[in-house]
Image: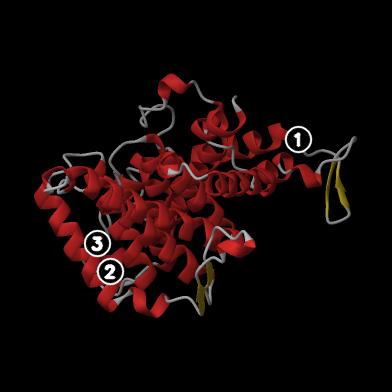
Amino acid sequence: MSARHLCRVEKYKTSREIVYRGQPLPNLSSHSAVEYMLKCIPVLKDFHTTEDGETRELIVTTAVILRHFEELDDEDEDPALDSRPDEGVNFLAILNAVLRSLTSDDLINRRELLIASYWVALRQEVYYALRKGYPAQMVEPPAEWSDISPANRIVFHTSQVTKWLFDDKSESGWHKLKEQEEYLDQYVTGRFEPILHRPPDRVLGEVFPTMWYASPIALTGMQHMMIAKMILTAESPLLSQAEDVRAAYRKAEGEVRSLVLQVCGTAVQHPDTQPGLVNAILAIQMYGSYFTDPWEQEALKKTVQMFKDCQAWPLPKALRERYYGS
């Protein structure tokens, strides 16, 4: 992952070689990351027969890292494959197979690396599913993992919203998720409230609200909650049943725009928390078309450019076409 990151970020490149914090890396190239990946693949071949708990932990962790490597290369694939998440090496299938076959020893001894890897993998799957447009396919956490952290409860809720969005989008499912959202707002998200929250000053040309969070966990957790809310608002089956359908849709679009601006504002104001920018790009890709105000459109474009400048991740094709015409 480090090799791919260093080769993609412009600030580390010179005319001759990659230089990181003053240290020349003459043998580092875009092929280095592929070579490392190929050395990792053999570790995964016996995932379905391995019974040793520590080895299973390492297999899951390796699969999570390699899946992230897939994310970095994802935009170079044939766009015709975008709707088929099962192409190539299916690291998600490996993760799910190991998690479905956890032993009593795995559960009793609470293998922390395995648990941490699961929650990282779930965040990956939420990103993948929303960007590519398919129901999240990650297995649910074992019942024995009852002490789920507040931030991970929010991520799990977002994964369920994603599954609903690209599955049947039933009205009963929507009501269930809204009840879950209300529960989280009442008992969970309060501990992640921003330490500073100020609406934008339009006179000064501000577009994003000022929202400062105490930790990266609070920031990314709340961004997931905002993304889940914008989906349930924009895709609500009740909109078409309203007495004034046009007014209902206009109100929903306004609420979604507000949530997108909040997600982007938190990302821009916390540049060191890079997952925040990834979530902002996801929100813009999904609902950036709701914006018609030139100032807001320009602010979104600057957020996209900020992501493009400081991230090693490729810019999603839909955003390249929308903002750069390519």
SS class, disc 3: loop
**Mark 3 vs mark 1, CA separation in Å:** 41 Å
Left or right of 188? Residue 27 is: right
Residue 29 circle label: 1
Residue type, label 2: Trp
Residue type, label 1: Ser
**Mark 2 vs mark 3, CA separation in Å:** 6 Å
Q: Looking at the image, which residue is at 36% across and 53% down?
A: 254
- What coloring was used for the rendering? secondary structure
- Report x, y in % for residue 105: 29, 66
Q: Which residue position holds label 3? A: 142
Q: Quadrant of residue 133?
A: top left
Disc 2 and disc 1 in contact, CB within 8 angstroms: no
Q: Looking at the image, which residue is at 50% across and 52% down?
A: 280
Against 255, is 43 above or below? above
For label 1, the crowd category at 10 Å Cα-Cα, with few meaning under 14, some 14 to 19 and many 20 or more, is some
Name the foreground residue: 98 vs 280.
280
Residue type, label 3: Pro
In the picture, the quarter occupied by the C terminus is: top right
Disc 3 and disc 1 in contact, CB within 8 angstroms: no
Left or right of 196? Residue 121 is: left
Q: Which residue position holds label 2? A: 145
Which sits earlier in the primary sequence, circle 2 or circle 1? 1
For label 2, the crowd category at 10 Å Cα-Cα, with few meaning under 14, some 14 to 19 and many 20 or more, is few
